[in-house]
Image: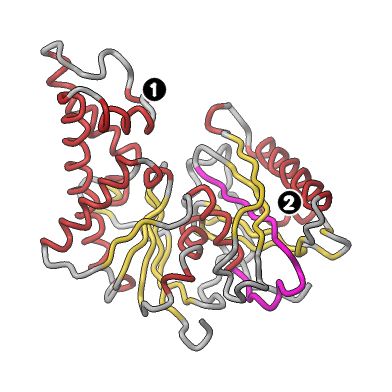
Amino acid sequence: MPVITEHGAKVLPSVEIDSYNLEIRDEEGFVGDRASHGAFKSIIEEWREPLRKLGADPLGDVPIEDVSKKQLDALLADGDPEAGGLVHSAIEAFAKELDHVIRRFLKSASWRDTEAIVIGGGFRKSRVGELAIGRTAVLLKAGGIDIDLNLIRNHPDEAGLIGAAHLMPSWTLEGFDGILAVDIGGTNIRAGVVELNLKKSSKLEKAKVWKSELWRHGDEKTKRDEAVDRLIDMLKDLIKAASKAKINLAPVIGIGCPGLIRPDGSIETGAQNLPGNWETKSFNLPACLKEAIPEIGKHETAVVMHNDAVVQGLSELPVMRTYDHWGALTIGTGLGNVRFTTRHDRS
């Protein structure tokens, strides 16, 4: 297997990364924290509080932690007017916060001249999330910010895997049917096989997830090393499944992980929501995976890891090549962020 890109690389085959995992502070703390999934639920709680005192909370006594995105979507579509109004109020308040956050990003040097932003993450896959993002787009344009705000096309769970195929030059994948990809999040770890379909498109426009496995580590009290062992088992199961299906895997594992990724594959900062300590220099996830899976298809395994927002944003490359400067935000446990400059000479 040819040498592929370093971990957390600033220059990738089709884009340069101007900034990722950007942390902007104001008097209230990190600006991005105001536009996370948890922030949305906090907004709902703020609206519930005065209603609760009047005995008129449309959600009753259900703790907000137990209210799912599907339930909120149902209240919006089929709930009584008061319940729907509660959700609409939260959407409006969250959109104002996201509008503020985006404006702050656009003022930073690394985000200037951004023409478009794609938004993914778990919040995007709900109707409530889509409406909040749509309302934010209206607020930005009404406020004189000329920027395209779009939803990530692929399902966010799949986008976090598909983007891994763009971490390396497509020529390194020629002759193979798929790659192993991993998406590590604050509550879930997902591993999958991404079918490359290079014969249909050399630019990976037809790449798709063939099979994936999900583990919700957030539901368990899991230690870091136990999480790594679980991930290794998932990858080995996928290798067996691909072999049985006659899918010729490239000897590479692409990983999206929260935080600022050092060139050696260790994590400098930003992995606080993961189980255990992932930020110590003595821990190196790519090295752990390569040791446990030294070969794929009789070829030496190569592992490349980048920030999860970077990887999810890369899944949009096929439709974002017309922009010179574009970004991606992932709304989940936190707010992931990345700003790209397209390498038109290579795209």
Outermost residue to the right:
298
Position of 172 with respect to 58 (left or right) is right
The residue wearing badge 2 is 288
What amino acid type should be assigned to the residue bearing mark 2?
Cys
Whether pointer 2 and pointer 1 mark residues with C-beta atoms closer than 8 Å, the reply is no
Residue 273 spot, x, y in % from top left: 48, 41
Circle 1 sits in a helix, a strand or a loop, which is it? helix
The image shows residue 52, relative to residue 187, as above or below, that is: above
Q: Residue 66: which disc?
A: 1
What amino acid type should be assigned to the residue bearing mark 1?
Asp
Instruction: Report the magenta residues as a range.
Output: 167-185
Q: How many marks?
A: 2
Q: CA distance from mark 2 to mark 1?
A: 35 Å
- Sequence-wise first label, 2 or 1: 1
The image shows residue 154, relative to residue 115, as above or below, that is: above
**Res 117 → quadrant:** bottom left
**Res 170 → quadrant:** bottom right
Position of 221 with respect to 28 (left or right) is right
Circle 2 sits in a helix, a strand or a loop, which is it? helix
Residue 142 spot, x, y in % from top left: 11, 61
Magenta-drawn stretch contains 292:
no
In the image, which is nearer the foreground, mark 2 or mark 1?
Answer: 1
**Res 99 → quadrant:** bottom left
Residue at point 26%, 27% (across, down): 78
